[in-house]
Structures are given as structure tokens and as C-alpha cells.
Image: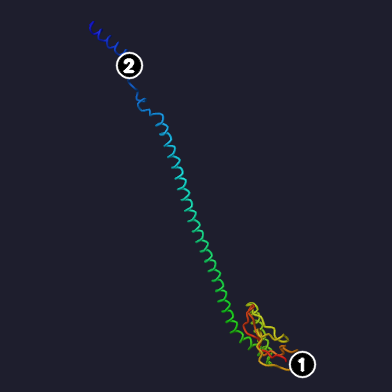
Amino acid sequence: MENEKDDLKQEKTTEETAPETETTPEAEAAPEPETAEKAAEEPEKETKDDKKKKKKDLKDALEKKEAELAEQKDQYLRLMAEYQNYRNRTTEEKKKIYGDAKVDCVKELLGVMDTFERALEAPCTDENYKKGVELTFTQIQKAFEKLGVTEVAALGETFDPNLHNAIKQVDDSDYESDKVCEVFQKGYMLGDRLIRPAMVAVSV
């Protein structure tokens, strides 16, 4: 028992007198001052580069999208312009087709109008018959007015080759030179479009 106590006492004395040469894990892991400074600088430098690269990538992507948007907008504007041109062209074509059909129809009815005018000028002893012809002629005139058909001014007007068709010249003292002195067949217009020129005689 005493021997064991002596051994313990001796070990304790040895531990107290032994030099402290052991190092802690923190001390072993701690880098030298210069190495630590470099290690701190490197992550910071990488972070800045990453930010610059990311910013550049975003800028490039934005520019690409803006270019795509501009191209799409240009295509849209071109398409809208083409569509508007198509609508205008179609509208004009419809107007022309309608106008041509209207003119053709009026031309066919002008012969009927001429016949009724000649019938009114012819002598007739049957008053009821004459009144019926007059009423029918009046209805045709009203129908022409609704369609926009107007008579070409001729008698007493200055000869206009765009509106009048001169079939002869007359030495008539009642009219000045180059005036329409007689109308053989009335002319008609549909709006500002000549359907048939007036057939006239011109004074000289």
C-alpha cells in the first residue's frame, strides 16, 4: 500500500516538472499570418469576378431579349401595315365593283328612259294613257335620283368634249359660238362619273 502511494506521488511530481510541449488543435490549424491574409483575399477576389461575370451575363441576356422584342415588334408593325393595305385595297375593289355594276344597270335603264321621253312627246288623244305614261316616267326619274343619277347640263352650255358628243355644227344666231344649241339625246352622270355623254349640236 505504501508502495502504491509512493508511485502515485512520483508520477504526479513528474507531470508537474515536465515541460509543456503539447499544442492545441486550434494552434495546429492556425495558418501563418501571411498565409491567412492571402487566404482571406482570394475568396473576396473570386466573389467580385463572379459578380462581374454574372452582371455581364445578365446584360447580354437583356440585350438579346431586347433585340428579339424589337424584331417581333417590327414584324408586328409590318403585318399590321400589310393588313391595313389589304383592307384598303379590298374596300376600293368592292367600291369599284359596286360602281361598275351600278353603271351597267343604269345604262340598261337609260334606253327605257329615252323611250318614255319620246312617248311623252308624241301626240296622244287618250288622256288617261298619257297620264299613265307621265306617272311611270316620273317614277323612273325618282328612282334615278335615289341612285345618284343626274342629267348632264347641255342646252345653252359651252361645249365640253368631256360631257358632250357633238354630232353636227349649226349656224344659229340665237346662240354664241361654241354653245350647245340643240340636244338630240340627254346625257347622264352617276355621281362624278359620266355614264353617257349628251348628243348635241354646237353653234358656230
Image location of residue 177, percent across then percent down? 74, 89
Q: Using the image as rendered, state which of residue 74 and residue 196 is in the foreground.
A: 74
Q: Is residue 204 depicted above or below 32 in this figure?
A: below
Q: Is mark 2 on a helix, strand or loop?
A: loop
Left or right? Give the position of 60 relative to 110: left
Q: Tag 1, which secondary structure?
A: loop
| Cα distance between the residues tagged 2 and 1 | 156 Å
* Residue at 59% over, 84% down: 107
Location of residue 178 by image quarter = bottom right
Q: What amino acid type should be assigned to the residue bearing mark 1? A: Ser
- In the rendering, which numbered label is found on residue 19? 2
Residue on which disc 1 sits: 173
Q: Quadrant of the N terminus?
A: top left
The residue drawn where x is 57% and y is 79% is 100
The circle drawn on residue 114 is: none
Q: In the rendered structure, which amino acid carries the disc numbered 2?
A: Pro
- Circle 1 Cα neighbour tier, 10 Å, few/some/many (<14 / 14–19 / ≥20): few
Q: Nearer the viewer, residue 10 or 108?
A: 10
Tell which of 23 and 57 is nearer to you.
23
Instruction: Indicate which label's residue lies in the foreground, 2 or 1.
Output: 2
Give residue 32's position: percent from left, percent from top: 39, 29
Q: Residue 77: where, in percent of width, then height?
A: 53, 62
Mark 2 and mark 1 lie on one chain; the one further toward the N terminus is 2
In the picture, measured across the screen, residue 16 lies left or right of residue 147, that is left
Q: How crowded is mark 2: few (under 14 residues within 10 Å), some or many (20 or more)?
A: few
User: Which residue is at the front of the view, 56 or 17?
Assistant: 17
